Amino acid sequence: MDITNQIIWLFVLAIPISCISWSVTHEEIFREPREWCVKNAANGRTILVRKAFYLFTCEYCFSHYVTVFFIFFCDYKLLMEDWRGYIIAGFSLVFVANLYMSLFGLLRQAIKKEKVEIKKIEKEEENISGS
């Protein structure tokens, strides 16, 4: 695969990695299992148990494991055709996926802020017109 295709794959393959990582660690559909993992991460008997459960609560940590799955599922290597290509691809994909998640988090935060400000303005207008 030439370098152009490898770079395209890097930015495209990071999309499902970030989507899965964000969904598992933030979205409502996974809230109950995540809360269970948070409890076990805090109260596990051994450090290994605590860290294993923490993995499902941190998008950065979880993205490493999702990345490993996608690298082998897609047989993606970056820059080199041997085992070093897998390592370079792994860290590169984690970086880009976490960049996507950070941008998504900032976007969601801005949207929530806008909604709160709109509700505040609407409430003020209701109070003015109701008086």
Image: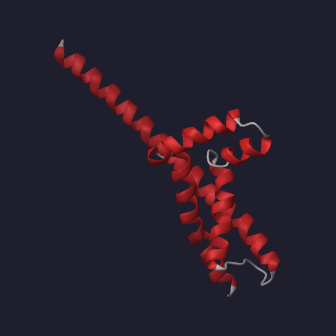
Residue 61 percent location from the top left of the image: 69, 52
Front residue of this view, candidates 85 and 58: 58
Front residue of this view, candidates 60 and 40: 40
Query: On the rendered image, what quadrant is the N terminus found in?
Result: bottom right
Front residue of this view, candidates 62 and 50: 50
Residue 124 percent location from the top left of the image: 29, 21
Left-right relation of 51 to 116: right
Residue drawn at x 68%, y 39% is 41
Q: How is the image coloured?
A: secondary structure
Q: In this picture, is 89 found above or below 17?
A: below
The answer to which quarter of the image holds residue 49 is top right
Residue drawn at x 65%, y 54% is 62
Residue drawn at x 71%, y 37% is 44
The answer to which quarter of the image holds residue 12 is bottom right
The residue most toward the bottom is: 1
Left-right relation of 53 to 127: right
Q: In this picture, is 28 found above or below 78?
A: above
Query: On the rendered image, what quadrant is the C terminus found in?
Result: top left
Front residue of this view, candidates 3 and 37: 37
Q: In this picture, is 1 found above or below 125?
A: below
Residue 2 percent location from the top left of the image: 68, 87
